[in-house]
Image (spheres, grey):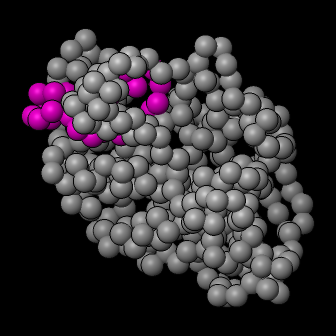
Amino acid sequence: MKSYQLVAFGAALEPNEKANPQPSGTEVLLRTRAAGVCHSDLHLCEGGYDLGGGKVLSLTDRGVRLPRTLGHETVGEVVAVGPDATGVAVGDIRLIYPWIGCGSCANCTAGSENLCLGAPANLGVHRDGGYADHILAPHPRYLLDLKGIEPTAAAPLACSGLTTYSALRKVMDVARRQPILLIGAGGLGLMCLALLKALGGKGAVVVDLDPAKREAALQAGALAVIDGAAPDAAAQINQALGTPLLAGIDFVGNPATAALGFDLLAKGGKMVIVGLFGGASPWSLPLFPMKALTVQGSYVGNLQELHELVDLVSTLPQTPLPIDARPLDQANQALDDLASGRVVGRAVLVP
């Protein structure tokens, strides 16, 4: 099995070769067909998250052990099954749900393994992931039929799509009545525009610093695009919305975007924060009760939501975001391009 592994935080991935693992129990071995390159992989490479004020959330303290094969957006072809694995057969093409929990805590038993309170076992984070020509899934229940979606388009659904879909569900009551605000036009922002339309939303105004990404958002159906660095960005956003802002999603998650979104919210408004760029919050606490505001975090999504998302995307006439397919041996270059903002849509590795 050939893979690209993180062997030290802050270092480039290194190629590794070893024998293919043999599935036991309920495990399923798949040959990787496509593996998305996610911004979260950059945080994994860095070894932590910026909490602001000089504080860092260490991934080592969160149970991440090296070496680790990254990649949590994976589509694979079943090549072997353990003796207790049922419901899949050799040759099946499946999207892998990677946000695997302990299975016994309150959140896991309620169906939200992505919010595991015990010992998470996320693929590409705590277990080896899809930056490899083979990947081991712990149980067939985490393997979803693609329902006709092409593998490179399906792979990003496991994180980019799922994260967006779960966040959108938290604001769709507003989004079906009036436009919402999206901050960030990377892979998640572009995916969000497609899903918003498919779910019957009234559209979105999109904010991004990058002209190329703003143009991509326009092509994807944004009502308007705004340069977040413009001195009058807030005024431009209000004018483009044409109505008080009651809902938005921040796909960036840094102090500047958090402040912009919060300050724009009207009374009773909600901002969902998805992005993990880092920093500390800049909000004035009295405004929460005075304006009855909600700021809600959203972390990927649960298995049921991924099933719903695949059903939805399978009905769309085209891929919900641009795909930049690359060979597996370009994993480091793909990460560098993502870090430098040179990826429009989603880079996907194809072994």
Quick check: 178 above or below 233? below
- The question of residue 43 being in magenta is answered with no
In-front residue for pair 152/110: 110
In-front residue for pair 318/201: 201
Residue 222 visible in the displayed image = no
Q: Which residue occupies the extreme right position in the image?
A: 19
Q: Which quadrant of the figure contains the N terminus?
A: bottom right
Direction from residue 23 to residue 90 in the image, left or right: left
- The question of residue 244 being in magenta is answered with yes
Residue 105 place in picture, x, y as percent: 69, 59
Direction from residue 284 to residue 244 in the image, left or right: left
Residue at 46% x, 30% y: name it: 253
Q: Which quadrant of the figure contains the C terminus?
A: bottom right
Direction from residue 112 to residue 223 in the image, left or right: left
Residue 264 place in picture, x, y as percent: 25, 25
Residue at 43% x, 39% y: name it: 296
Quick check: 210 above or below 230? below
Number of marks present in the image shown: 0
Quadrant for residue 311, please give it. Answer: bottom left
Residue 4 visible in the displayed image = yes
Quick check: 301 above or below 280? below
Residue 259 place in picture, x, y as percent: 37, 21
Residue at 27% x, 40% y: name it: 247
Direction from residue 17 to residue 107 in the image, left or right: left
Residue at 44% x, 17% y: name it: 282
Quadrant for residue 195, please give it. Answer: bottom left
Residue 159 place in picture, x, y as percent: 53, 54
- The span shown in magenta is 237-262
